[in-house]
Amino acid sequence: MTRITAGMINDDVQVGIQTNGTQLDKLMTQLSDGRAITQPSDDPAGTAVDLRLRSTTSRLDQYYRNMQDGQAWITTADTALKSGNDALQRANELGIQGANGTYSAVERNDLNQEVRSVLDQMLSISNTSLHGMYVFSGTQTGIPPYSLQHGSDTITTVANANGTSLTAVPSTIQLFDTKLQDSSTATGNPAVKDAIPGTLSIAGLTEGTDYTVDYVKGTVTFLTAAATAQAASAQGIQVDYDWIRRTEKDISGSVDREVQPGNTIQVNVNADQAFGSTTQTSAFDSIIALMQGLHTNSQSQVQSSLSNVQASLTRLLQAQTVAGSRQNRMTSTSDQNRSDALVVTQQTSQIEEVDYTKVISEYQNRQTIYQASIQMGAKVIQPSLVNYL
């Protein structure tokens, strides 16, 4: 038969008091910080569920950040497209005025100056950026889709590196920008397209008499002996002009944002969709053609250019519609994301946060037990002579 000693009783009582104190301290901690789980051992099963919920919250938050960024892209593009719409509407109105048979050359030149302002506005719109990234450049966000270049070319009777020369008239010459050497052409000089009417000049020759220009194609047709004589001179024919250059990089790419597992939304409108591809009559082609008609006082060309201006306007409106549909989809998905995040947050709260009513009740009971254990221990553990020996 096992003998129960005073030391054994003393140890058991102290262990009981310590256990009750530990439980009381745990409840006090829960009440102070409001968390039901302070360490995994408090609730292993609940901890596992809590970790899964926190991982889900993290993913939902990242998707939401993706959507916020996507919203900014779409909103920026949509605002720019609306401005482009207004600009092309104005160009169309000016074109209709210029097509009026009663307008004089001076009046059409005045209109041309205003259309030039529309062209500059469209160039600025095409280069709209967000956080330093060009929104209409596809995946080539560090490159502006269009740029204003101040170009020049020299034409002589001997073919230059670009293969152009003038030995007889009439002859049509394709202009190359010899100031640039970043093209895919053999010389690196890009072929000119969309030269700006009113900016092309050749000293000693007169436009309309010695030469004509197709500003959209970037070609000059020389007509007189004066042109061939200048080509044969030491300096040749010096052609200076401004032109709108579209980058040769592929700017048709799609910028996507993942908004749900396996679900992405395109957040950009590329230059092809907004302004026209290289195989289409672009918005810039349309404006340049209108400007050429006004610059040369050609009523018929002004009239013929209007259909392309209106087609460019239709393209912009279609791009706006696409951006709007993506905006609606993004908003709907964003609302669903926040709804899901709220549910997960509530589930996490149920696991992590204490039920104050329950814990306070447990704390009061545990405090009573703890005080009782101390009082009982004081009676059970009585000093004896052995303690003093």
Image: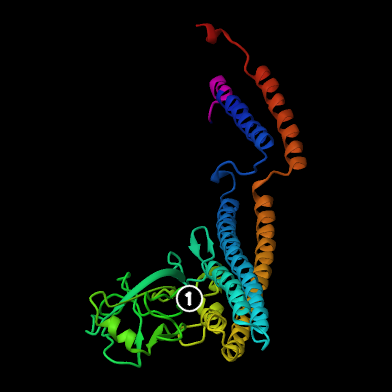
Question: How many marks are shown on the rendered structure?
Answer: 1
Q: Is residue 167 left or right of residue 32?
A: left
Question: Visible in this render: residue 260?
Answer: no
SS label for mark 1: loop
Q: Position of residue 218 (x, y in %)?
A: 41, 82
125, above or below 48, in the image: below
Name the foreground residue: 274 vs 354: 274
Does the segment drawn in magenta span residue 80?
Answer: no
Location of residue 241 (image quadrant): bottom left
Name the foreground residue: 274 vs 372: 274
Q: Is residue 374 left or right of residue 139?
A: right
Location of residue 35 (image quadrant): top right
The amino acid type, in three-letter code, at marker 1 is Ile
Q: Residue at x 62, y 27 (%)?
A: 17
Name the foreground residue: 286 vs 263: 286
Q: Report the coloring of the rendering.
A: rainbow
Q: Position of residue 248 (x, y in %)?
A: 39, 76
128, above or below 277, in the image: above
The residue that label 1 is drawn on is 196
Q: What residue span does the magenta drawing correspond to? A: 2-10
Q: Position of residue 382 (x, y in %)?
A: 63, 14
Question: Visible in this render: residue 28?
Answer: yes
Q: Position of residue 178 (x, y in %)?
A: 31, 73
